[in-house]
Image (cartoon, rainbow, N blue to C red):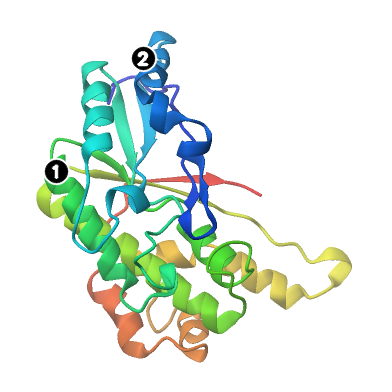
């Protein structure tokens, strides 16, 4: 990364939900025109790019990976003198992971994937293991906006726990291979207001909960943390929460969208 204080960075939209046939890398044709796209990025003077890896495409069955497309893109990024921030998981889970983020061992599965990627490309330093982890969990398992289209607190807390665990395990696996890796996490930090005095406690609770996932993987949600009780009340056991306290990981940079 450059020593200058500010850099322009870009990226290619890479959200995917293969369960419903959505794949932005395909829709924008970057899967086809990746080489010319990357050349044009460099031509306009950009030397840093957040680059999405299509998990559902490179890992179509357990422990089997096809890096053919990724090899070409990452090699060219290096040749062009561009620094990539690897966006490993941008909403879409492979079809073989039943239930997606709700799978009981989702965290382990994401860890497998992160380990395999880091072993393939051990020279890479910058990672976003999970894009917008709070949104990933809440939109899929609390608001039913996207896959797996679930609602309610019991689904939400399970999703928060699984997504936080996947992020935690991914960071740990990458750093075992590349100890100097920097973790750059992007998420939202929406603030809830009580409109004309309506539902003030709900607004306060949701504004406190917005950093739940990030507090969890950093081991900050202990028995004194307000969200500990929320998680246990809705179905996550003590052992599940203690795991984060005992195996916390370090985040290096947090980038936030404010809504």
Q: Give SS at disc 2.
A: helix
Label 1–label 2 contact, CB within 8 A:
no
What is the spatial separation of the Cα atoms under label 1 and label 2, in whole angstroms? Answer: 23 Å
- Quarter of the image where the N terminus is located: top left
Tell me if I can see residue 248 in this picture.
no
Tell me if I can see residue 159 in this picture.
yes
Is the residue marked by circle 1 packed among few (<14), some (14-19), or many (20+) residues within 10 Å? few
Q: Quadrant for residue 240, please give it.
A: bottom left
Q: Quadrant for residue 5, please give it.
A: top left
Q: Tell me the residue that label 1 is attached to.
A: 120
Q: Give SS at disc 1.
A: helix
What x and y, as percent, mark residue 134? 50, 61
Residue at point 18%, 57% (across, down): 173
In the displayed orientation, state which residue is furthest to the top. 43
For residue 98, above or below residue 116: below
Residue at point 88%, 66% (across, down): 196
Q: Is residue 8 left or right of residue 116?
A: right
Q: Is residue 228 left or right of residue 67?
A: right
Residue at point 24%, 28% (across, down): 72
Q: Nearer the viewer, residue 97 or 78?
A: 97
**Mark linked to residue 244:** none
What x and y, as percent, mark residue 67? 22, 42
Is the residue marked by circle 2 packed among few (<14), some (14-19), or many (20+) residues within 10 Å? some
What x and y, as percent, mark residue 58? 28, 48
Q: Nearer the viewer, residue 244 or 77?
A: 77
Q: Earlier in the sequence, mark 1 or mark 2?
A: 2
Q: Tell me the residue that label 2 is attached to.
A: 39
What x and y, as percent, mark residue 137? 50, 66
For residue 83, above or below residue 242: above
Q: How many marks?
A: 2
For residue 144, above or below residue 11: below
In the displayed orientation, state which residue is furthest to the right. 196
């Amino acid at each position: 990364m450059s020593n200058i204080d500010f850099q322009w960075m870009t990226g290619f939209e890479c959200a995917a939900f293969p369960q419903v046939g959505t794949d932005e890398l395909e829709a924008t044709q970057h899967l086809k025109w990746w080489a010319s796209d990357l050349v044009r990025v460099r031509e306009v003077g950009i030397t840093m790019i957040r680059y999405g890896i299509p998990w559902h495409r490179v890992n179509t069955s357990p422990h089997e990976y096809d890096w053919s497309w990724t090899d070409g893109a990452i090699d060219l990024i290096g040749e062009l003198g561009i620094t990539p921030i690897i966006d490993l998981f941008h909403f879409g889970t492979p079809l073989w992971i039943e239930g997606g983020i709700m799978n009981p061992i989702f965290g382990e599965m994401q860890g497998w994937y992160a380990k395999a990627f880091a072993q393939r490309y051990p020279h890479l330093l910058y990672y976003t293991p999970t894009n917008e982890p709070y949104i990933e969990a809440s939109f899929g398992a609390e608001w039913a906006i996207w896959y797996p289209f679930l609602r309610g607190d019991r689904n939400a807390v399970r999703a928060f726990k699984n997504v936080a665990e996947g992020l935690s395990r991914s960071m740990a696996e990458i750093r075992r291979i590349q100890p100097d890796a920097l973790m750059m996490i992007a998420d939202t930090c929406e603030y809830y207001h009580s409109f004309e005095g309506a539902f003030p406690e709900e607004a306060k609770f949701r504004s406190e909960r917005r950093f739940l996932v990030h507090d969890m993987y950093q081991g900050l949600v202990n028995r004194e943390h307000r969200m500990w009780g929320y998680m246990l009340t809705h179905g996550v056991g003590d052992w599940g929460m203690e795991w984060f306290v005992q195996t916390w990981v370090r985040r290096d940079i947090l980038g936030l969208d404010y809504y």
